[in-house]
Image: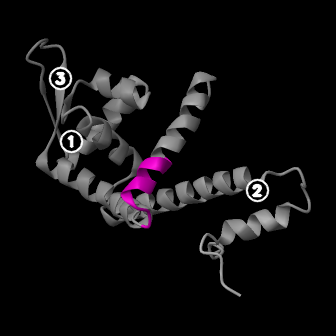
């Protein structure tokens, strides 16, 4: 008997498949595709979070230091404390404490503002940019490794599908 050329071999199973199998008898109304997608997204997000945290440990950065360097890098390496406060959604005293610690480590410099002498400008130093970038690369390499299992077209399709879901979430006022 000849095999149907359209028939695909079954996809390999992962831990989420076992999770869905366990819950279907308990919740027969469960949509296995929704549960599978949400569980996989959740587990991948947790995995990447653990990788990020290990990267911070490996490069001797605390999460709040990385977040501050990241916000500063996202502004071209220069910002006012009020800009960082808005980006990080922090109280003024919290930003001041972070900036003092980062300055002691040589990751930022603070200079009087050229526009208003009562203010200061924050600049990312080469050491700060290097520490931020090295820690960022840890998670970037893992993202590339994982999504490298997909073709470029599959990655684009995945991104497009997730955008569609995100747009719905954003339009309905989700956090």
Q: Residue 38, image x and y in percent?
A: 66, 51
Q: Is residue 105 left or right of residue 62?
A: left
Asked if 133 appears above or below 21 in the picture, the reply is above
User: Which quadrant of the view contains residue 135?
Assistant: bottom left
For label 3, the residue is 120
Residue range in magenta is 149-158
Q: Residue 78, image x and y in percent?
A: 18, 31
Along the line of sight, which residue is nearer the eye, 67 or 18?
Answer: 18
Is residue 175 visible to us here? no
Q: Residues within 10 Å of mark 3 (few under 14, many from 20)?
A: some
User: Mainly helix, strand or loop, the magenta region?
Assistant: helix
Q: Residue 119, image x and y in percent?
A: 19, 17
Along the line of sight, which residue is nearer the eye, 2 or 20?
Answer: 2
Disc 1 element: helix
Mark number displayed over residue 103 = 1
Instruction: Give yes or no for contact between labels 2 and 1 (Cβ–Cβ under 8 Å).
Output: no
Along the line of sight, which residue is nearer the eye, 58 or 144?
Answer: 144
Q: Is residue 101 left or right of residue 123?
A: right
Q: Distance from label 2 to label 3 (Cα)?
A: 54 Å
Asked if 23 appears above or below 122 in the picture, the reply is below
Q: Residue furthest front?
A: 1
For label 2, the residue is 32
Q: Residue furthest left?
A: 114
Q: Earlier in the sequence, mark 3 or mark 1?
A: 1
Q: Earlier in the sequence, mark 2 or mark 3?
A: 2
Q: Residue drawn at (43%, 61%), measured in percent from left and top? A: 147
């Amino acid at each position: 008997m000849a095999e149907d050329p359209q028939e695909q071999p079954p996809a390999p199973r992962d831990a989420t498949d076992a999770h869905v199998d366990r819950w279907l008898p308990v919740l027969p109304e469960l949509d296995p595709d929704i549960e599978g997608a949400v569980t996989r997204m959740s587990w991948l997000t947790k995995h990447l979070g653990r990788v990020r945290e290990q990267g911070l440990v490996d490069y001797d950065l605390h999460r709040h230091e990385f977040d501050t360097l990241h916000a500063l890098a996202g502004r071209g390496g220069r910002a006012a404390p009020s800009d960082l406060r808005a980006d990080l959604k922090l109280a003024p005293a919290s930003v001041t404490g972070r900036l003092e610690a980062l300055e002691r480590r040589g990751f930022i410099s603070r200079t009087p503002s050229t526009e208003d002498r009562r203010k200061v400008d924050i600049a990312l130093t080469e050491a700060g940019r290097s520490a931020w970038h090295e820690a960022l690369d840890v998670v970037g390499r893992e993202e590339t490794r994982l999504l490298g299992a997909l073709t470029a077209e599959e990655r684009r399709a995945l991104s497009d599908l997730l955008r569609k879901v995100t747009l719905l979430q954003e339009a309905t006022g989700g956090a």
